[in-house]
Image: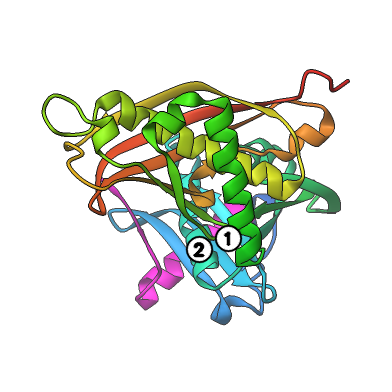
Amino acid sequence: MRIRLSSPQSDAQWQAYYQFRWQQLRAPWQQPIGSERDELETSSIHRMLLDGETVVGVGRLHQVDATRAQLRYMAVASSYQGQQLGARLVAELEQQALALGCSEVVLNARENALGFYQKLGYSQQEELASQFGVRHFRMQRFIRFTANTGSWQQQCQQLEQVWHQQIPLSQFMQLQITAFDGCELRCQVPLPPNINLHGTMFAGSIYSLATLTGWGLLHLQLQALELQADLVLADASIRYLKPMQTQPQARCSLLGAKGDLTVLRQGKNASQRIDVELLSANKVVALFSGHYKALLPRNTP
C-alpha cells in the first residue's frame, strides 16, 4: 500500500499521532505519557506518514524567530526505515519552513542520527546536554541564503563568466541565468543552437543544461558559505519524459540539494546530490539527478 503524507485531522488521528510519538521517542526511556508533548503543539506544523490508517512516521516544525524554524519529534517506525520516508518528512517540513519565510532550519539530533541529517544537508554544530543519557548535537541547514538582489545579480554574472571561460560548451549553448533568489536557480538556453534533426532539443544539450544548472547551484552555495572547492560531476541519471520543443529552461533549489558542504572546513571533500527539473514552456519534460563532488583545492594542506 502506498504511504501517505498528511497532517492529523480527526481526533483519532491526533491520538494515534501522539501515541506513535510517545512509543518511538519516550517509552524506550521509561518516560511517562504526556512527555511527548510541549507548549508549542498548537502553534506548530505537524506531519505524519500513514500506511492505510496506521501511523508509521511523524515530524513537527515550529518557527523559532523571523529567520529560523526547528524540526522536532522526528521518528519513523523501524520496520519502515530505509525507504526514504524520513527524508520525505524532512523535505515536507523544510518546504513549510520556506513558506513561513525562514532561511534556516535547525534541529537537535541524537548521535545515531547525525549521518542521516548530514546526508540531507545539515551541518553538525555544538554538542548539547544529553537527554535520557543519549548524546545530542545541534544541526543546521540553510534553505535560503539571504542577500540583496544586487548581490545575487553580481554573483550570477560572475558565474556566467566562469561558465563561458572555463566550460566553452556553455558559451556555444548560450547558457544564461534567468533568476536566483537565494534558494532556487533558473537557467535557460535558446533552442536553435541546441536543436536536433527532429526540431526539438538535442538530448546531449538537455543533459548539459541540467549538469551546468546543478553545478551552478553548488557554486553559488560555496560562495554564500565562503568556501572554496573544485567542482566535478561524479555520477548522474536523467529521465526524458517529453521532447523539449520550445523555451528550454532548467531549475533547481536548495531544498533539492542534499549533502553537507561545511565538511570542507574540516579538511574533507564534500558531495551533494542535486535534483534538476528541465522545462519546455514551463512544463517539466525531464528529470535529472546529479551527484557532485566538491574537492579541496589542490594547494590546500
Q: Could you say whether the residue bearing mark 1 is in a helix, strand or loop?
A: helix
Q: Is residue 46 above or below residue 288?
A: below
Q: Is residue 7 magenta?
A: yes
Q: Residue 244, position in %: x, y?
A: 21, 39
- Image quarter where the N terminus lies is top left
Label 1 crowd bin: few (<14), some (14–19), many (20+), radius 10 Å? many
The secondary structure that most of the magenta stretch takes on is helix
Q: Is residue 24 visible?
A: yes
Q: How is the image coloured?
A: rainbow
Position in image of residue 229 (x %, y %): 71, 30
| Residue 103 seen in render | no
Could you tell me which residue is drawn at 78 percent across and 53 percent down? Answer: 132
Question: Which residue is drawn at the image coordinates 54% and 41% (left, top)?
Answer: 160
Q: Position of residue 24 (x, y in %)?
A: 57, 52
Of 127 and 269, nearer the camera is 269
Is residue 282 found left or right of 128 in the rendered image? left
Residue linked to disc 2 = 19
CB under 8 Å between discs 2 and 1: yes
Q: Is residue 21 left or right of residue 126?
A: left
Mark 2 residue element: helix
Identified at 35% across, 41% down, the residue is 189
Q: Which residue is mark 1?
A: 22
Q: Is residue 172 magenta?
A: no
Q: Quadrant of residue 105?
A: bottom right
